[in-house]
Image (tube, rainbow, N blue to C red):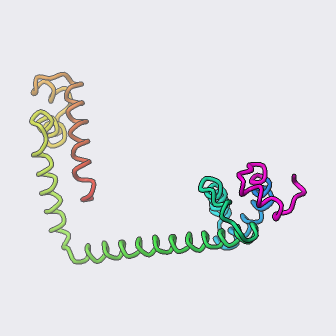
Amino acid sequence: MYDFDDNELLPLLRNGSLEAYEILFKRYYKMLCLHAAIILLDESEAEDLVIELFIEIWDKRIYRKIEQSFKAYLFKSVTNKCINKIKKIKLSKQKKEEYQQYRKEDKEKTPFWLEQRELASNINNALLELPAQRLKAFMLVYVEKKRYQDAAEEMGLSINSVKTHLKLALKVLRNKLENLI
């Protein structure tokens, strides 16, 4: 079957022949990867793109709809996918640059002392939302700088209980404050 040309393999492929599909894959894979690598300037991306195309052709049964030459279809599809990939990369880069510019302008507009006051206010609010035991453990260890043993004695708990309260308090604080920093 390897000596069949595309015109003989295409009808077999349209009928769902996995063997015809494998032959066409082996015949065109390297050429398509080279073609995509020239456009994308990235060999790894090119290989991924070509594999995705072949998977898509098989999974979506696109092979049943191919009326032109299989080779022409493949090269046109790879070219289009490369162009779309480049557009997507450019758009992503553009959005990232716009966001960075926005953040830069935003920081330039807001005085540093105001940012610090707002951050302190948000930290205070987050602390006040903690359950009493967690807040007390946090204040004793991180604000009053007490050792775990001293905090445990003052709270009437074991050292491990204090550590657990601290761990849970820090987790909640991180979640509440992660967007602010």
Q: Nearer the viewer, residue 79 or 161?
A: 79
Query: Is 7 colored magenta in this rendering?
Result: yes
In the drawing, does residue 137 fall left or right of residue 101? left
Q: Nearer the viewer, residue 131 or 121?
A: 131
- Among the 4 quarters of the image, the one containing residue 35: bottom right
Q: Nearer the viewer, residue 77 or 146?
A: 77
In the drawing, does residue 112 fall left or right of residue 33? left
The percent position of residue 40, horizontal first and vertical second, equals 64, 70
Q: Nearer the viewer, residue 57 or 128?
A: 57
The percent position of residue 85, horizontal first and vertical second, equals 56, 69
Q: How many marks?
A: 0
Query: Is 125 colored magenta in this rendering?
Result: no
Q: Could you tell me what secondary structure mostly forms the magenta stretch?
A: helix
In the drawing, does residue 98 fall left or right of residue 39? left
Q: Residue furthest right?
A: 3
Using the image, determine if residue 33 lies above or below residue 91: above
Identified at 74% across, 50% down, the residue is: 17
Q: Quadrant of the C terminus?
A: bottom left
Identified at 61% across, 57% down, the residue is: 56
The percent position of residue 80, horizontal first and vertical second, equals 61, 73
Identified at 79% across, 55% down, the residue is: 26
Identified at 10% across, 23% down, the residue is: 156
- Among the 4 quarters of the image, the one containing residue 61: bottom right
The residues colored magenta run 1-22
- Among the 4 quarters of the image, the one containing residue 38: bottom right
